[in-house]
Image (cartoon, grey):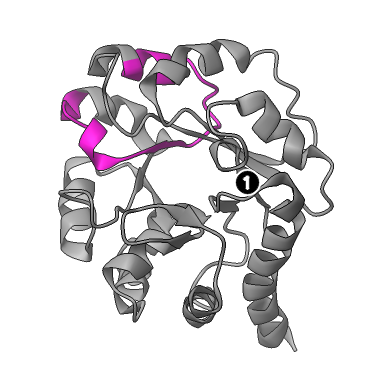
Amino acid sequence: MRPIGFSTGALAKGDFRSGLEAQRELDGVDAVELSALRDHELATLVEATESLDLHGFTYVSFHAPSKLQTLNEKTVFELLLSLPDAWPLVVHPELLQTPSLWRQLGGRLCIENMDNRKATGRTVLELRELFDTYPSASFCLDLGHARQIDPTMASAILMLRQFGGRLRQLHVSDVGPFGQHLPLGATARRSFARIAGHIPPDCPIIIESIVATDAIERELDAVTTVFESVLAQATA
């Protein structure tokens, strides 16, 4: 079974400890993404990583700030550089202002495809330009973003064909018209089921659906059902 878990930011905005604890004891959860989407959260989370209890998580990634507001690019880069080498560093393209800086991360740099609020990283062509600039970078496929840009999921399948060798993890949630991360609705489940068979069975899933504490297990079950049912059919 592939690693699966939640982004700490989805379960507790700005409170990584609560976001971690909310999923620690859930059956089947063995992946986590530590999230510092707002740059004022970054230094505190980076400093705390040495003391965080990550026992039981076989896969850990780290989500960089989505934009620069209180920190400059070099400071953000240096803070991310201090994190464990094994952790993919998920980055939005707009953060990558100085290519010579970010290329130093090699495959640790994990570029995420974007939604309709962004100026790049939304399509196969825009991603190809990014990976030409960062030839060693890996890829975080955000299925909610991909579906918002192309509800048929044809673009997502093309992304996998073009960049599947770089794929490091998935982001899974429904995504609203203004980029809000939502629990999976029936239409999103059907859309993601169409693409699930194109995704390697060992690719980690990070759930970004923003859900209340009493809905965490329900969302975990919904996402697991979409992807594991495809695996079961393939091995039947």
Does residue 143 show up magenta in the picture? no
Q: In this view, does 157 lie above or below 216?
A: below
Q: What element carries label 1?
A: strand
Q: How crowded is mark 1: few (under 14 residues within 10 Å), some or many (20 or more)?
A: many
What residue is shown at x 74% (from left), y 42% (from top)?
23
Residue 51 image point, x, y percent? 70, 13
What residue is shown at x 56% (from left), y 43% (from top)?
10
- Which quarter of the picture shows residue 20? top right
Residue 25 image point, x, y percent? 84, 41
- Location of the N terminus by quadrant is bottom right
Q: Can residue 81 be seen in this view?
A: no
Give the residue number, with chain letter if any, for mark 1.
6
Residue 86 image point, x, y percent? 55, 31
Whether residue 109 sits left or right of residue 118 in the image: it is right
What residue is shown at x 38% (from left), y 61% (from top)?
176
Q: What stretch is highlighted in magenta?
A: 76-100
